[in-house]
Amino acid sequence: MEEYQYITEQLDRLLTDYIRNDRAAAGMAVGIVYNQQPIYAKGFGVKNKETGEPVDGNTLFHMASISKTYVATAVMQLVEQGKVLLDEKVTTYLPYFTMQDERYCDITVKHLLSHTSGMPDEDDYEWDRPQFDEGALERYVRSISDRELLWDPGFGKYEYSNIGFEILGDLIAKASGVSFEQYMQEHILNALRMDSSSYSKPDVDEGLLATPHVMGMSSSFGAKVSSIYPYNRSHGPSSTLLTSAAESCRYAMAYLNRGCLDEARILQESSVDKVWQAITPADDFGYYRKVGLSWFMGQYKGFEAKAHGGSDTGFRSNLVILPEKGMAVTIMFNTDYLGLHSVNNAILDVLLGEKVDMIPRSLTMHVAGILADEGEEAAVQAHISGTDDRAAQGFVSADTDFSYRFIAQRLLDNGEPENAIKVLELAVRIDPDAEELRLMLDQLAEQTLKP
């Protein structure tokens, strides 16, 4: 117990300082499993910047693509029941599924689960035009009949696809005979006693919800409440799980226990092995360079790691499991632009017994905040100071060119083109030789000046 106390005290200090010192943050929740036991589920910051209500370990966050790992779990349950075969064609279960070219006929369930179907990704989730009825998923599957595959289905090529998981959600509904949301609730969430969690936003306690925040710079730099909540039943399987730090730990423990928790078994041990078996290389997720059935796999400091991240309007999330250490970390942000990896790595390092003095923050986010509050000259000096003394001031090393373009694009996406231009003007002043920064600035300035 003394070991647990030391760990929790270290985490309290690090995470409290991180949220307090990062002007771009809103709220965050962290759940931790250590030695197969839940030892930490706490919140930091606020659910909503306008109300100031604090986040806690029971606050519900939109988990974005971590939702996909639950979908894979459900598909494997149906495989165990003999209702679905991994190597069967998707059209066997969804005869109305068609695409523009005939190669779609070769797509199997396993292809979709492993992002090897050749399926393109979605670029409009219609969060601003949500559908709430039970027919939404089937309509979406029918609506992609004009899409084309990127290449032949097969395990040689990887392309991350949210579309593939909407198809899997519809397959779960048709194979089980109940709606996708009902199946997930009854067979995974309720089974694990994740009583507040749901794929259906209308069914959860509104008082538990974290509010999504996007990047703004109109009054000050940082989090502003999003006018859009990322919910749409057409995209439930890929994205819309709502859960808390506390309840996410129960899901992680079920996987650490090879498919069971308390009296509930959600998967056979052999199914856990299949889900976590690497199928093809993937380079989307940092340390995690291979993909299995939805999960990404790699190593963290010599230990086998299974992980998935998520990002949608106003939210970011990450879940990583180290099976041989009996550890799991889940992180939830109600902002969509803060980096998760610095926080994730700091927590893992503490759990592995390493000394961590601080969680590094983004220098470019800090400089953008100075620009908003104090002007360009002060921002230039902040950049120089932060670059010269990055480690001591607690800033993470980053590609400055990319980081400033990222900030500008987020401001542009959120309806603040003038502020995006200010950031790019600052960035070009800091790095006059950055061609991509200058090109983006010139293009944006031209678009903004058009009548």
Image (cartoon, helix red, strand yellow):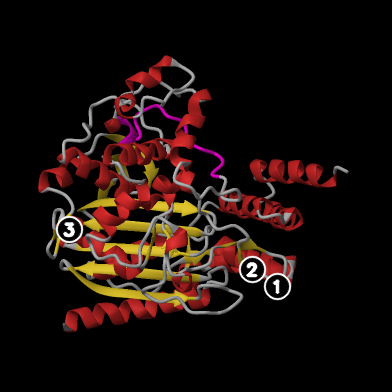
Residue type at mark 1 is Asp
Q: Magenta span covers which residues? A: 111-125
Q: Distance between the residues labelled 1 and 2?
A: 6 Å
The image quadrant where one finds the N terminus is: bottom left
Which quadrant holds residue 124? top right
**In the rendered structure, does residue 114 fall within the stretch colored magenta?**
yes
Residue drawn 42% across and 29% down? 119
Residue hosting label 2:
369
Asked if the residues shown at circle 1 and circle 2 are in contact, with their CB atoms under 8 angstroms apart, the answer is: yes
Residue drawn 40% across and 49% down? 65
Residue type at mark 2 is Gly
Residue type at mark 3 is Leu
Q: Distance between the residues labelled 1 and 3?
A: 46 Å
Residue hosting label 1:
373
Asked if the residues shown at circle 1 and circle 3 are in contact, with their CB atoms under 8 angstroms apart, the answer is: no
The tag on residue 256 is 3
Main SS, magenta region, reads loop
**How many marks can you see?**
3
Q: Where is residue 280 in the image (x, y as percent from the top left)?
A: 28, 33
Q: Position of residue 335 (x, y in %)?
A: 52, 62
Q: Earlier in the sequence, mark 1 or mark 3?
A: 3
Mark 2: secondary structure: helix
- Whether residue 23 is visible here, answered yes or no, is yes
Q: Is residue 119 above or below residue 303?
A: above
Asked if the residues shown at circle 2 and circle 3 are in contact, with their CB atoms under 8 angstroms apart, the answer is: no
Mark 1: secondary structure: helix
- Whether residue 276 is visible here, answered yes or no, is no
Q: Is residue 239 above or below residue 389?
A: above
Whether residue 306 sits left or right of residue 215 in the image: it is left
Q: Earlier in the sequence, mark 2 or mark 3?
A: 3
Mark 3 residue crowding within 10 angstroms, few (<14) / some (14–19) / many (20+): many
